[in-house]
Image (cartoon, rainbow, N blue to C red):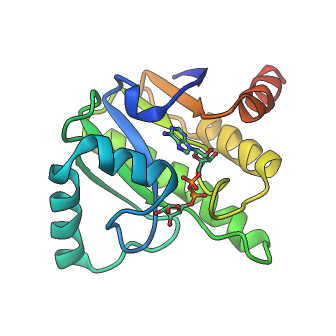
């Protein structure tokens, strides 16, 4: 499994799957979630509504998969990051679960390339350095030959530089 780092808007990425930093409602929001639904179109929202009707809300750390609508990717994997709030080990575990459960869904759906945003580090205020460490360690320890490439997509230069440094260690 190859790890790649880029600074970009995740809605432009042509991987088998892109990951969305969603909320428990699965029905859209701001940040990367808003961008994915805006560009991906109503097909994604419709698919999310069906999942909601079937299973109810999506809990933090869990993930679901839908079409990518009008986006270049084939699928969107929606995962719900933890809200940092007071922080704590449980929040760290939930963030790791976002990466693990997204990768598990990728394997189940024969996805070979997957792109992750910096889950929870925007509106949910997870400390960026800790989030980057958890993201990299969790992906690295997910041993799965079927996934060929995992791309960390950083929106801003600051996070890109942070990942770049951590990936060299
Ligand atoms: N491409 C890549 N990364 C992006 C993009 C983009 N187009 N837009 C923002 N980011 P956030 P969260 C980065 O707030 O903290 C939504 O309302 C951003 O710079 O999108 O998990 C949901 O519905 C940051 O580093 O997600 C939830 O309610 C990272 O993506 C809530 O926000 C995550 O920021 C989730 O909050």
Specify whether 112 is left or right of 145. left
Quarter of the image that includes the C terminus: top right
Q: Nearer the viewer, residue 17 or 70?
A: 70
Decide: is 114 above or below 101.
above
**Residue drawn 19% across the image and 41% down it:** 69
Decide: is 24 above or below 131.
below
**Residue 21 on image: x %, y %:** 49, 54
**Residue drawn 80% across the image and 51% down it:** 130
**Residue drawn 68% across the image and 37% down it:** 136
Specify whether 3 is left or right of 163. left
**Residue 89 on image: x %, y %:** 77, 70
Decide: is 1 above or below 42.
above
- Can residue 146 be spotted in the picture? no
Specify whether 39 is left or right of 122. left
Q: Nearer the viewer, residue 26 or 123?
A: 123
Decide: is 104 above or below 45.
above
**Residue drawn 37% across the image and 74% down it:** 25
């Amino acid at each position: 499994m190859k790890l790649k780092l880029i600074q970009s808007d995740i809605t432009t990425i042509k991987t088998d799957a892109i990951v969305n930093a969603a909320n428990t409602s699965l029905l859209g929001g701001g940040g990367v979630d808003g961008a994915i639904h805006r560009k991906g179109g109503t097909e994604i929202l419709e698919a999310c509504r069906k999942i909601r009707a079937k299973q109810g809300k999506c809990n933090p750390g869990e993930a679901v998969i839908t079409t990518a609508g009008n986006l270049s990717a084939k699928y969107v994997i929606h995962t719900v990051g933890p809200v940092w709030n007071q922080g704590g080990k449980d929040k760290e575990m939930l963030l790791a679960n976002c990466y693990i459960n997204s990768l598990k869904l990728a394997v189940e759906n024969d996805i070979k390339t997957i792109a992750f945003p910096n889950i929870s580090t925007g509106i949910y205020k997870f400390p960026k350095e800790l989030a980057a460490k958890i993201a990299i360690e969790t992906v690295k320890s997910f041993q799965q030959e079927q996934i060929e490439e995992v791309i960390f997509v950083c929106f801003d230069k600051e996070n890109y530089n942070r990942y770049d440094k951590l990936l060299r260690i």
